[in-house]
Image (tube, rainbow, N blue to C red):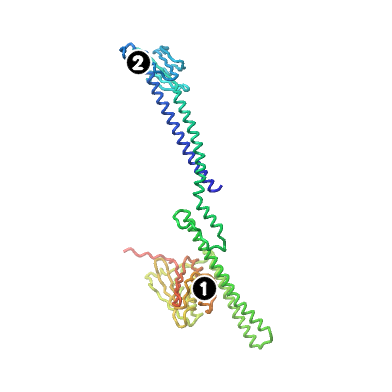
Amino acid sequence: MKIRYKLSLQFTSIFALILIFFSLVIYYFTSIYRQEDFYKRIHRRALITAKYILDSDKMSPAERRQSQINYYQELPYEAVRVYNSNGDLYFAEGDGEVGINPKVLSRIKQQKIVEYEQGVRQVVGIYHTAQASGFYVLASSVDAYSLRKLQHLKVILIVGFLGSMVIVIIAGWGFSQQALKPITKVVSEVEKISASDLHMRLSNADGKDEISHLAQTFNKMLDRLELSFEMQSTFVSSASHELRTPLTAMIGELEVALMKPREPEEYARVLRSTLEDARLLTELSNGLLQIAQASLDPSKIKLSYLRFDELVWTAHDQVLKRLPDAHISINFANFPDDEDRLMVKGNEALLLIAVVNVLENAIKFTPTGQTVNALIILRDSEVILEVTDQGLGIKEEDLKHVFVPFFRAENVRNITGHGIGLPLAERILKLHKGQIVVDSILDKGTKVTIKLPQAYMFIPAVP
């Protein structure tokens, strides 16, 4: 069922229940009031009858005259019965049937006043003790006029309920349409967005209601999807270029070598060139394999406790073995009194790859002879490594692509590399609940910051 139908149905049901309850309350209290009011009138008639029939000899002529006037102001369908103390009929007037039995007389004598219904007729019985022996006076009547009014009220309430329901259904349908109009607009706009239109955004994102919040959330998701698609496109084009270049070189070298007989030295040169290109392809394949391994489920990776500073020094030694002419300076910003604060929990091999890649990346883009600075910082519950170089820097528009595999900025195309180092480091750090941040200024240098959670939370001693 559509939400519009549900809203209309719920709105109508709630209003119908309220209206039914309201109508029942009105009818019930009106009926109770009518009944009690008529009982009071019948009770007054019983007292007038008792006074006129049983106490007339004690009255003055004026009082008797007034009592007579009151007595003849009858109620509709009135019936009066007076019984002596033995239960014998003493006086009767009116054609209405007034049921009487010893139990009723006993209740009247005990309670003095008894009210009860006999069909549509209401009866009031009183015990009169003005004379030596008591008398039972029963007055009854039918409240025909009020009963007709009550029946008329019932018809009004039923007709009013049905008429109100028609209005409520129409109003509920219009209300649900108006209430769902923003959602309908969102749906129509979402249906227009495809993989080729990820630049489009929902228009209802400026307000502060739930629909605006939904539109804002959806727009943020589109931002992420657009960036993801752009990164994927960049990855595919860059990977294709990186893989095609050594293959093209190998094929070209081999085709030239086979065009005519060559000297042994020439064949040896072609083989060396082909071997170099094959090694390049191997490095690319290994990089892709490492990225795939770094995307595994963290629960499948074996973790252990490591000293972060020792890990950095191990990475420093490995880099110097590969690049003997490199200059790396490692320092502490604040060496802790408790060395356990340098502990991190992770996979040593993967973290070593990440740190080595960051250091090698910095050295690669640093002019020959200049030093790459690595600073170890302890801050709150994190261990931080800041690697700073004085290299070419990265353009601001290229910074968002630095973690895309095979992406390389335009200003470093002439420098050997595959664009795998930083993406691989970023995925490894994510597996360890860490973070890597790149800040760069063009022609001034780049700072790469690695953050890992401490495996030991330092708690200062209480003085």
Q: How many marks?
A: 2
Left or right of 366? Residue 248 is right
Q: Nearer the viewer, residue 213 or 239?
A: 213
Which mark is nearer the camera, 1 or 2?
A: 2
Mark closer to the chain start, 1 or 2: 2
Q: Are marks 1 and 2 in contact (CB under 8 Å)?
A: no
Name the amino acid type tagged 1: Gly
Instruction: Please tell me which residue is depicted at 50% across the width and 49% down the height of the picture.
Output: 178
At label 2, counting other C-alpha atoms closer than 10 Å, the crowd grade (few under 14, some 14-19, many 20 or more) is some
Q: Looking at this rendering, what residue extends furthest in the top direction? A: 57
Q: Nearer the viewer, residue 118 or 199?
A: 199
Location of the C terminus by quadrant is bottom left
Q: Position of residue 42 (x, y in %)?
A: 40, 21
Q: Nearer the viewer, residue 250 or 431?
A: 250
Q: Looking at this rendering, what residue extends furthest in the right direction? A: 260
At label 1, counting other C-alpha atoms closer than 10 Å, the crowd grade (few under 14, some 14-19, many 20 or more) is many
Name the amino acid type tagged 2: Ser
- Find numbered disc 1 in the image and state the secondary structure of the residue it sits on: helix
Q: Which label was assigned to residue 67?
A: 2
Q: Which residue is mark 1?
A: 421
Instruction: Please tell me which residue is depicted at 46% across the width and 53% down the height of the picture.
Output: 210
Instruction: Please tell me which residue is depicted at 60% across the width and 75% down the height of the picture.
Output: 244
Question: In which quarter of the view is residue 329 placed?
Answer: bottom left
Q: CA distance from mark 1 to mark 2?
A: 117 Å
Q: Is residue 278 above or below residue 404?
A: below
Q: Position of residue 377 (x, y in %)?
A: 40, 71
Q: Nearer the viewer, residue 59 or 184?
A: 184
Q: Position of residue 245 (x, y in %)?
A: 59, 77
- Find numbered disc 2 in the image and state the secondary structure of the residue it sits on: helix
